[in-house]
Amino acid sequence: MRKKGLFFSTVVIFPLFVITLAVAPTAQAVYPEPGKVIELMHHSSPGGGAGLFVLTCGELLNKTGIVKNKIQVTTHQGGSSAVALNYLLSKGGDPNVVMMWTTAQLNALNRGTTKMKFEEVTWLTTLVEDGNVMIVPYKSPYKTYKDLLADAKSKPKKVSVGINSIGGSEHIMAARIERVAGVKFNITAFEFSPTQLIGGHIDMAFGNTAETSSHVKAKRARVLANMGETRVPYYKDIPTLIEQGTNAAFTQFRGFFGGPNFSPEAVKFWEDAFAKLVKTKEFKEFAKKSDYVVSYKTAAETKAFIQGYNAELIKDAKYIQESK
């Protein structure tokens, strides 16, 4: 009887052990993985609007403790965002590589000049609206927007305009003026067009407050128009193009996205991180100083918003292509 009892006990215990293994939860990967460096990347020059924005976001995410992992800011310039987007694609959805998005990236994807496709983007957030203004050298003969427009109408391609990248925000602004006002500019891409303007190499450029305010204060540049539908706070005394008779406007947005196959856990992490970031005192001060309007959107809200916003950019891209 003792032997049977021992045998019975062994049989009962073994199946319970098997059941325990079957229902044990699978351990999920922790994101972000401790010790992993996170790369926040952009497509432009370090001193431009994109570079300053990404650098500040990275610094504040670390400084405030929202993101514990070290954040490294990198730039991948070239091909009007194609180099940066192809680099992001090469990372295969690595959740430790996050890229800033703005107009240049959307248009690069629209043009099909990148290996990465529009549908492969993993949207993470929209953070701010970034208003722009039109500037000319302070000693320019163009004292008003109407002066510049009159010269552009009488002498096609005489007025030279600097843009930072093909299909970027500056290119869109110039193209919308051309379409509505019936003029043609001499458009040239530079690494950072406001610098070229101050150097006397071009007649007109576009930039946000962070890029232009120091030049305006030092009387190296003059603002002729606000480029949005409303005036940005810093340049509240400068009328918009619409107010000056040209029914064109453009507002740029800045946010972040990841590559294809970005994990849902990483999407949620960045959604929450950026939601916390825009509520910090430091970010609010940065936004005010830079003349940004905080416009936080979740991943899902950003994806929905992009559909309508990008439809207008596709029209701009078609015009730019046909104008070559």
Image (tube, grey):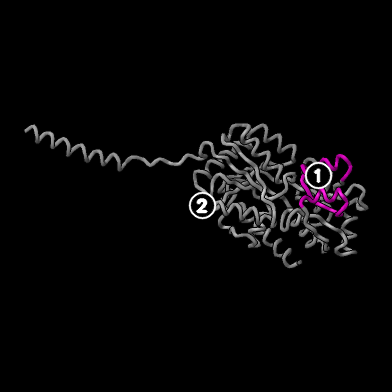
Q: Are marks 2 and 1 in contact (CB under 8 Å)?
A: no
Quadrant, the N terminus: top left
Picture coordinates of residue 147 (x, y %)?
Answer: 90, 55
Among the two numbered marks 2 and 1 on one chain, the one whose residue lies closer to the N terminus: 1
Residue kind at label 2, given as amino acid type: Asn
Disc 2: which residue: 261
Q: Which mark is residue 79?
A: none
Number of residues whose C-alpha sits closer than 10 Å to that of mark 1, classed few (under 14), some (14–19) or many (20 or more)? many
**CA–CA distance between discs 2 and 1?**
38 Å
Residue kind at label 1, given as amino acid type: Thr
Picture coordinates of residue 29 (x, y %)?
Answer: 45, 41
User: Which element carries disc 2, helix, strand or loop?
Assistant: loop
Judge whether 315 appears above or below 43 on screen: below
Disc 1: which residue: 212
| Residue 309 in view in this figure | no
Whether the magenta-drawn stretch holds residue 213 is answered as yes
Extent of the magenta region: 191-220
User: Which element carries disc 1, helix, strand or loop?
Assistant: helix
Judge whether 178 appears above or below 297 on screen: below
Count of marks, rendered view: 2
